[in-house]
Image (cartoon, rainbow, N blue to C red):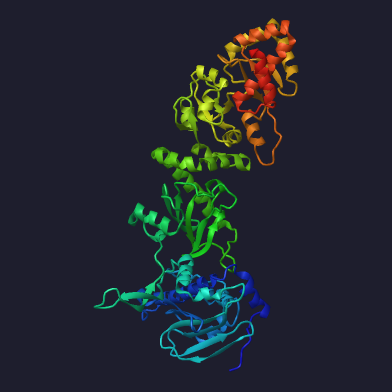
């Protein structure tokens, strides 16, 4: 029989489809299984309007058979089959979709959804096969036909014998090459893994034969090798079941089966949306961070299904970065896919789903915070840092979504508190939300700058994470209350101390402080009488947007940014050290220089900043001792 050239396009078009459209060879199995599922669905659609046709789901299945000796892989379905004309039109014309035409003709009917749209999935078989033979017998026909092709050169069609209605595809798998191992597509367990990955939720049984051992009758420890047929797909996905049918254990088992993590999820979210866009989703909030979570190697995203067929392993567009810890899946009929069904076209439906998912995650976390505080704090220990990065990132544009999820350690409550809880306890005369920064809670509690705020009885938030102050700067205010660092220039509570400081400067202290500033030239912006110190002799404060803690963090970054805070050396005019400074100013300029450098270096140590010249510092201490 003479070969028929492909009616559509050229040899180059088929080569492009085989070599360029699909990124992974294993996709071919997903495409052929989807086509087989469509063929069975078409019988279901026919049965809706044809009373003589009874659709019994138990009679329909897909069978995969691998034969290593002949290097053939066979996929058989019990679907609607194809006539000679349909073989000619659907397989002989590249990019013509019989499924799409059928879908358009039957779009008003309720029932199963046809998966195929583009008419190119079948040709993915040529990524792994040298030859493809399709034998099909259509519903209502007594004749069968065989379509055969070895690629772009063309195909043949001839009558064939086939007892059952349906389609059989036999692929002759390519031989191995130095770079490519095609044998994997003849290994039953590898094929099963591909089915589980992409087609686990195809609604019809996908059957395969496996060799297994069966004990011999009447013989101990002896076994026969037998062939056992198994259904390898789950068929009914958990997300299409009613929530009332499912238990926490069901969701946890799904989490483990899909290998979303090795921990136990803290919370699950089951969404069944039927509005502007129709989709189902199951989302999980993990208990612990993956080992690579805060690295460039970590990939965020949800599994994306279209009608139960896996399209993408990780669809990053469904999650904002600040919720990148969420695991799970989304299944929708409404997504616009590209021709290979591997990538999404960014459209309105996708954006609607992503927005809805973001809101669901946020409301679930708020609920967890209010009703299951211990579990939320466990979650926050793992992923609170990510929420803070979300507040700081994109110039603070997401702060409204995240501010109510933040927790910080409280100086008065001695535990983590939310911003809402802090503000609800603020006295009427308190103007600001006060915070102190440092490497640890213990270190912060010893800071001299906290004294005046603590004496006023005001609560402070302790920032121990390097992102904390950056996030708060982006947040700027919470419920109309501004944030104020205890190390900032003006705390808004120093009225009594201000009078003392002003008196000190009027009593000739201004000249002393100007002299000390000259000694520390370039190191501090000014030296002044402190309005905040009670028992400590000295501290550093900062003016402007860059705090001392922010300076430390920025300098520690790999690019070594030379960022400097505008530091102010504050002297406690009620401390004995102040009198010593005044005496040195009057009697011994060299001692004033010695004391000034000592006090400055002490202030650096209190802040956790490095001393520029440790040798000079120790020599200065020795001079005082002598």
Residue nearer the viewer, 281 or 550? 550
Residue 408's x, y, as percent? 50, 33
Residue nearer the viewer, 64 or 290? 290
Residue 358's x, y, as percent? 51, 48
- Whether residue 178 is visible here, answered yes or no, is yes
Question: Residue at the spot x=42%, y=79% of the render?
Answer: 78
Residue 249's x, y, as percent? 35, 54
Question: Residue at the spot x=47%, y=58% of the render?
Answer: 279
Q: Would you say 200 lies left or right of 496 here?
A: left
Residue 344's x, y, as percent? 58, 61
Q: Please identify the quadrant where the N terminus is shown.
A: bottom right
Residue nearer the viewer, 583 or 267? 583
- Asked if 243 appears above or below 10 in the picture, the reply is above
Residue nearer the viewer, 317 or 50? 317
Question: Residue at the spot x=62%, y=72% of the render?
Answer: 179
Question: Residue at the spot x=58%, y=85% of the render?
Answer: 149
Q: Please identify the quadrant where the C terminus is shown.
A: top right
Q: Residue furthest front?
A: 626
How many numbered marks does the figure carry?
0
- Whether residue 104 is visible here, answered yes or no, is no
- Give the image quarter of residue 40: bottom left
- Give the image quarter of residue 574: top right
- Asked if 584 appears above or below 139 in the picture, the reply is above
- Asked if 307 appears above or below 381 in the picture, the reply is below
Q: Residue furthest left?
A: 218
């Amino acid at each position: 029989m003479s070969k028929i050239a492909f009616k559509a396009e050229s040899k180059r078009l088929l080569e492009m489809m085989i070599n360029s459209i699909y990124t992974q060879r294993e996709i071919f199995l997903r495409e052929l299984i989807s086509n087989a599922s469509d063929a069975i669905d078409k019988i279901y659609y026919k049965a809706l309007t044809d009373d003589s046709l009874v659709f019994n789901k138990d009679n329909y299945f897909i069978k995969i058979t691998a034969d290593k000796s002949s290097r053939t892989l066979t996929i058989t379905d019990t679907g609607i089959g194809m006539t000679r004309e349909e073989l000619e039109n659907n397989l002989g014309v590249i990019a013509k979709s019989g499924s799409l035409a059928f879908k358009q003709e039957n779009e008003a009917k309720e029932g199963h959804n046809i998966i195929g749209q583009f008419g190119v999935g079948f040709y993915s078989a040529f990524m792994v096969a040298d030859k493809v033979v399709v034998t099909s017998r259509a519903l209502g026909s007594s004749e069968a036909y065989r379509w055969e092709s070895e690629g772009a050169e063309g195909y043949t069609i001839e009558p064939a014998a086939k007892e059952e209605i349906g389609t059989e595809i036999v692929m002759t798998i390519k031989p191995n090459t130095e770079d490519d191992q095609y044998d994997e597509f003849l290994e039953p367990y590898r094929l099963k893994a591909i089915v589980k990955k992409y087609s686990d939720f195809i609604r019809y049984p996908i059957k395969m034969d496996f060799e297994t051992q069966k004990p011999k009758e009447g013989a101990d420890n002896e076994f026969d090798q037998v062939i056992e047929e198994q259904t390898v797909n789950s068929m009914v996905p958990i997300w299409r079941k009613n929530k009332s049918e499912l238990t926490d254990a069901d969701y946890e088992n799904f989490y483990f089966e899909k290998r979303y993590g090795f921990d136990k999820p803290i919370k699950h979210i089951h969404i069944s949306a039927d509005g502007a866009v129709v989709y189902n989703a199951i989302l999980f909030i993990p208990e612990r961070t993956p080992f690579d979570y805060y690295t460039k190697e970590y990939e965020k995203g949800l599994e994306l299904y279209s009608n139960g067929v896996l399209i993408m392993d990780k669809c990053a567009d469904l999650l904002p970065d600040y919720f990148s810890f969420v695991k799970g899946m989304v299944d929708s009929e409404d997504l616009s896919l590209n021709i290979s069904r591997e990538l999404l076209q960014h459209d309105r439906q996708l954006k609607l789903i992503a927005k809805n998912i973001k809101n669901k995650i946020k409301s679930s976390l708020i609920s967890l915070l209010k009703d299951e505080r211990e579990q939320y704090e466990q979650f926050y220990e793992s992923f609170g840092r990510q929420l803070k990065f979300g507040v700081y990132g994109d110039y603070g544009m997401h702060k409204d979504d995240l501010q109510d999820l933040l927790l910080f350690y409280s100086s008065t409550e001695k535990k983590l508190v939310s911003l809402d809880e802090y503000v609800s306890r603020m006295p009427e005369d308190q103007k600001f939300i006060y915070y102190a920064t440092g490497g640890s809670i213990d270190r912060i509690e010893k800071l001299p700058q906290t004294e005046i705020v603590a004496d006023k009885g005001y609560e402070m938030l302790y920032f121990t994470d390097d992102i904390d102050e950056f996030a708060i700067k982006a947040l700027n205010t919470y419920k109309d209350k501004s944030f104020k660092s205890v190390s900032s220039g003006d705390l808004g509570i120093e009225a009594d101390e201000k009078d003392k400081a002003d008196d000190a400067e009027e009593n000739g202290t201004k000249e002393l402080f100007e002299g000390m500033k000259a000694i520390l030239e370039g190191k501090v912006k000014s030296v002044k009488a402190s309005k905040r110190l009670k028992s400590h002799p000295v501290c550093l404060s900062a003016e402007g947007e860059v705090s001392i803690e922010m300076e430390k963090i920025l300098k520690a970054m790999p690019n070594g940014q030379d960022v400097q805070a505008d530091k102010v050396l504050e002297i406690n005019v009620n401390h004995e050290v102040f009198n010593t400074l005044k005496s040195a100013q009057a009697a011994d300029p060299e001692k004033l220089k010695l004391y000034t450098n000592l006090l400055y270096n002490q202030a650096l140590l209190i802040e956790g900043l490095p001393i520029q010249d440790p040798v000079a510092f120790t020599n200065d201490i020795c001079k005082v001792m002598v």
